[in-house]
Image (tube, rainbow, N blue to C red):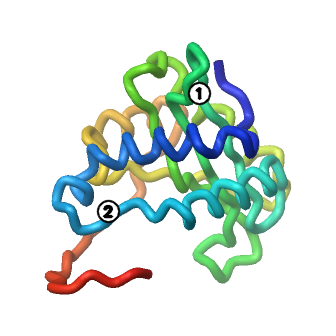
């Protein structure tokens, strides 16, 4: 079942995010940990801004099966290239685990696109599939099924850090 997230879902969403994060290359390398307090605040702010249609609005839905949260789409509205006078909708967190049904991830994307279309100021949707997840090509194909097209490339550079510090 797909539904809007609410505040009582935050602990279960956090467990899902920690589980999915555990499969990332960041977790495997041990260089970045989940900031639990920050994540809880982020989720609460998103829930309070859910389904708004202006700058900093959010869209947050979950997949729930057998009483467990097994998928999440959190998106936001931001100014085009930060300086534009129009908005774009972009995914912030998009995850699902093995308990989610195959069609449910697609339904989250479809719902997010419909939310973006309802905002008169929103001119596009952008979603990313990076190597932080196990199979970014599979996710990219899912985006393409909804009419999204590849849009540039992304590059990264890691830094060697000898001490730990907090953001």
Q: Which of 161 and 90 is in front in this view?
A: 161
Residue at the spot of label 2: 153
Residue 139 position by quadrant: top left
User: Crowding near pointer 2: few (<14 within 10 Å), some, many (20+)?
Assistant: few
Q: Is residue 162 above or below residue 89?
A: below
Q: Residue at x 37, y 49 (%)?
A: 129
For the residues bearing labels 2 and 1, Cβ distance under 8 angstroms: no
Residue 107 position by quadrant: top right
Q: Position of residue 117 (x, y in %)?
A: 76, 45
Q: In this view, does 94 lie above or below 120?
A: above
Q: Which residue is drawn at 64% across and 71% down?
A: 80
Query: If the image is split into quadrants, where does the C terminus sit?
Result: bottom left
User: Crowding near pointer 1: few (<14 within 10 Å), some, many (20+)?
Assistant: many
Asked if one can make out residue 133 in the rendered structure from this viewpoint, the answer is yes
Q: In this view, does 166 lie above or below 137?
A: below
Q: Nearer the viewer, residue 136 or 163?
A: 163
Separation of residues labelled 2 and 1 (CA atoms): 29 Å
Kind of element beneath mark 2: loop
Disc count in the image?
2
Residue at the spot of label 1: 63
Q: Earlier in the sequence, mark 2 or mark 1?
A: 1
């Amino acid at each position: 079942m797909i539904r809007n997230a609410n505040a009582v879902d935050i602990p279960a969403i956090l467990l899902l995010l920690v589980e999915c994060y555990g499969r990332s290359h960041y977790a495997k390398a041990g260089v970045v940990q989940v900031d639990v307090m920050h994540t809880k605040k982020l989720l609460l702010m998103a829930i309070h801004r859910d389904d708004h249609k202006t700058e900093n609005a959010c869209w947050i839905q979950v997949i729930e099966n057998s009483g467990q949260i097994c998928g999440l789409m959190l998106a936001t509205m931001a100014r085009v290239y930060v300086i534009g006078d129009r908005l774009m909708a972009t995914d912030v967190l998009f995850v699902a685990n093995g308990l989610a049904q195959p069609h449910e991830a697609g339904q989250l994307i479809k719902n997010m696109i419909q939310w973006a279309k309802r905002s008169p100021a929103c001119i596009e949707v952008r979603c990313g599939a990076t190597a932080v997840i196990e199979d970014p090509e599979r996710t990219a194909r899912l985006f393409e099924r909804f009419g999204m097209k590849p849009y540039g490339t992304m590059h990264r550079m890691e830094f060697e850090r000898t001490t730990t510090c907090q953001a």
